[in-house]
Amino acid sequence: MSFSKRHILFSLVIITFISVLFNIPIFAQEEITVINSYGIYTLEMLGYEDVVFEQPSDFEKKDFHYCLPDGAKQGPEDWYLIHISYDVIVSKDSGTGSLLISSLSNDYSSAQIEVITEYNDNGALVTTWNTVDLVNDYLEYSSQGLRASGNFTNYMQTSGIRQGKSTLSFQLETFGDIKVEKVIISKDSGIEFTSVSPPHLDLEAECRTPNAGVGAPIILYFSLTNNGDLPAKDVVVTARTNDDHLLTDTTEFRYSSIEYKEKVDGTFTFYANEDKSCFIYIRASAHGSSNSPIATFTIPVNIESSSGQAWIPLLIAMPTILILVIALLAKIKP
């Protein structure tokens, strides 16, 4: 070994020894921003510029780093959202196909934007795109040109939130014959740390006729409260059963919106035409809700408890029977 090589090796050993002894990093380390107070932390604030994909291939992914404090988690007090400002330019010689833009936190998806190219009735290539998120559910957009741009916001997945160093990724996938000139994720995109919670549905339900008889009403009462900060939209409360011996005239209640702390209630009524147990479940769901609660009931039906009310199912079916009779009379009318 030459003197110069021995000298270099000796110098490296000494540098490493000093680094370990005094806890001094040998190489410069990436400075990672800690998200530790409420507000929006843009890519620029995290130390990055616009994220640009030039003529992306079938699959591309770029990673960026941030840090969350000890004990960080998604809810119930603290919440994390992703904000994306995007601009997609489709090539003039593109064919039909689609581009899927995803944002991931620690490999858990928090955003999906699908851009689709297709020919219209005039034979021109046009662009449509759609987004799906917890706040607005499904939204669809269109353009007569070859450009798709907009802003996207969504609550991040619970599994993607963890304390310490984290990775924010932007991922592109292309399908079919689409050709993309450029995708730009603006440096104004980023992560929001907030106390504002998404809609959260709390369902309470009870059976008010636990000892139902054949033909007697089985009454299920429910109350539903939105305990999230944001309004729950397009709320549906359904009652379902797989038992074919149960009859009912109402299977769902719908509400366009339920505000913070607002409470709604209602009743479902079933009738059994056989003396055997029945299983019924009530489920509540809404666009933008962080949960979809379910209440289940197993209810015995006893012939001894019928109290002579076996005529009630016939009463429920009476409107249908009456319509059939009128139709039949109309056909045989001279």
Image (cartoon, rainbow, N blue to C red):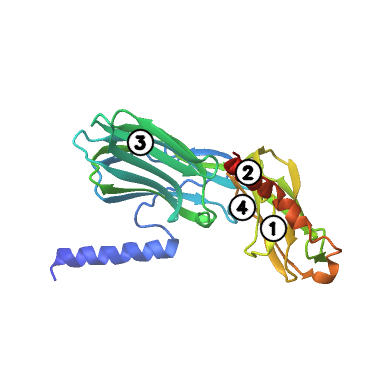
Q: Is residue 239 visible?
A: yes
Amino acid carrying mark 3 in the image:
Thr
Amino acid carrying mark 4 in the image:
Asn
Q: Secondary structure at mark 3?
A: strand
User: x, y (%) of residue 239?
Assistant: 67, 55
Q: Earlier in the sequence, mark 1 or mark 4?
A: 1
Residue at the disc numbered 2: 329
Q: Earlier in the sequence, mark 3 or mark 4?
A: 3
Q: Secondary structure at mark 2?
A: helix
Residue at the disc numbered 1: 247
- Mark 1 vs mark 4, CA separation in Å: 29 Å
Residue at the disc numbered 3: 128
Residue under the point 66% across and 51% down = 251
- Mark 3 vs mark 1, CA separation in Å: 45 Å
Q: Is residue 194 visible?
A: no
User: x, y (%) of residue 85?
Assistant: 42, 35
